[in-house]
């Protein structure tokens, strides 16, 4: 780990490369970092049930607490972003509609942020990695006014910065401001994120495939034949691939980024648009994937080229090592 290169330091050092460097984006990202630390500390206490520390209330901790943490994370990120006044509004998985901040300092902000405050939250009560996913756009509405829906319905191609926090065996922020993807690992003893993974890139090809194969009967025939291909024995192409599925998109993506692999949440007959949300799950990860030399598609179109039409719209997602995504596409087309 590059001691003394903190996330803040790294951002300042690279700020000259930003197309419009005012320090505002660095300031914005520092509010995400702060909120991430607060959420991280709360997540680490999630197993400390009522009768151990008397903290989380007397109601059933299962399910209840998980729901609480979703809402808690949403509030912390929202409050931190509003306090730093760099964004004029946010859209979140936990909010029915976008939130346009009223404060004049926020209305003067240049950016909007879209967020899945807690991803994989069904894994909280079984002590498995979860995450936060976010992306940032320049607003299209005039500065000084309230944010409008159009600020949030921009194509992924327009993303200025995106990242995720993975609350795993260690806590990391993985971030791109359009100049590659960099990972910063949290040292809880000093409360600092240190640069630990400079210039993360997807291996061109890996041998991991990640999919909820319980949905197999509901996949289309082309997806089924691709999955059959993943499991065939062919040493020359390193098959069968290895199946790995955590059920936390952030964690599955993070592992595949480091080791090489493909993640699939395809359309099913029950969910014709898949399950994942375009604006705050697929787009940020697609941006990071491309910055890391990977690819992301919905099976027909590059995720970043999709024109969003609604805040919570879903879309199929196939993402990961470039040659594996192309291999998948060759089965679809
Ligand atoms: P969230 O917790 O934000 O609702 O997201 C859950 C998502 C994603 O993290 C994961 O990859 C996927 O749901 C798992 O879905 P299945 O349980 O259908 O496999
Ligand atoms: Mn999610
Ligand atoms: Mn979520």
Image (cartoon, rainbow, N blue to C red):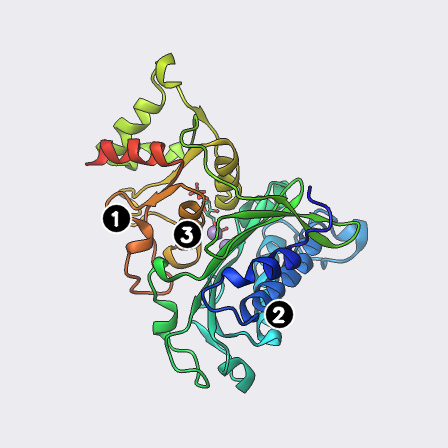
- Residue sitting at 75 percent across and 55 percent down? 191
Q: Where is mark 2, residue-wise?
A: 80
**What x and y, as percent, mark residue 12?**
61, 61
- Residue sitting at 48 percent across and 49 percent down? 180
From what the image shows, is residue 50 above or below residue 20? Answer: above
Mark 1 Cβ inside 8 Å of ligand 1:
no
If the image is split into quadrants, where does the C terminus sit?
top left
**What x and y, as percent, mark residue 115?**
49, 61
Q: Residue 287, labelled with which disc?
A: 3
Q: Where is mark 1, residue-wise?
A: 301
Quarter of the image where one finds residue 212 = top left
SS of the residue under disc 2: helix
From what the image shows, is residue 328 above or below residue 291? Answer: above
Whether pointer 1 and pointer 2 mark residues with C-beta atoms closer than 8 Å, the reply is no
- Residue situated in front as seen by the camera: 10 or 153: 10
**What x and y, as percent, mark residue 149?**
36, 74
Quarter of the image where one finds residue 304 = bottom left
Q: Earlier in the sequence, mark 1 or mark 2?
A: 2
- Regarding residue 17, the answer to whether it shows in the image is yes
């Amino acid at each position: 780990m590059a001691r003394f290169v903190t996330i803040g330091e790294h951002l300042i050092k690279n700020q000259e490369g930003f197309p419009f460097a005012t320090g505002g984006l660095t300031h914005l990202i520092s509010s995400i970092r702060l909120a991430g630390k607060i959420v991280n500390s709360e997540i680490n206490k999630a197993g400390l049930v009522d009768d151990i520390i008397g903290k989380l209330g007397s109601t059933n901790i299962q399910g209840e607490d998980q729901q609480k943490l979703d809402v808690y994370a949403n509030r912390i990120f929202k409050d931190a972003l509003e306090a730093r006044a760099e964004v004029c509004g946010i859209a979140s998985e936990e909010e029915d509609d976008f939130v346009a901040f009223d404060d004049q300092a926020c209305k003067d902000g240049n950016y909007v942020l879209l967020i899945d405050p807690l991803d994989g939250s069904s894994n909280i009560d079984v002590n498995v990695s979860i995450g936060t996913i976010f992306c940032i756009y320049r607003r299209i509405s005039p500065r000084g006014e309230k944010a409008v829906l159009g600020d949030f319905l921009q194509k992924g191609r327009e993303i200025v910065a995106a990242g995720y926090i993975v609350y795993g065996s260690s806590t990391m922020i993985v971030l791109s401001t359009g100049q590659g993807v960099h990972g910063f690992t949290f040292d809880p003893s000093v409360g600092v994120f240190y640069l630990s993974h400079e210039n993360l890139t997807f291996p061109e090809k890996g041998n991991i495939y990640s999919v909820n194969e319980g949905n197999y009967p509901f996949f289309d025939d082309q997806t089924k034949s691709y999955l059959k291909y993943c499991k065939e024995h062919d040493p020359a192409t390193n098959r069968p691939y290895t199946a790995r599925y955590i059920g936390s998109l952030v964690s599955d993506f993070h592992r595949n980024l480091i080791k090489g692999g493909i993640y699939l949440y395809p359309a099913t007959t029950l969910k014709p648009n898949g399950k994942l949300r375009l604006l705050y799950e697929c787009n940020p990860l697609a941006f990071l994937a491309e910055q890391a030399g990977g690819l992301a598609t919905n099976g027909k179109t590059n995720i970043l080229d999709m024109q969003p039409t609604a805040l919570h719209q879903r879309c199929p997602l196939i993402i990961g090592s470039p040659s594996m995504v192309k291999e998948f596409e060759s089965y679809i087309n």
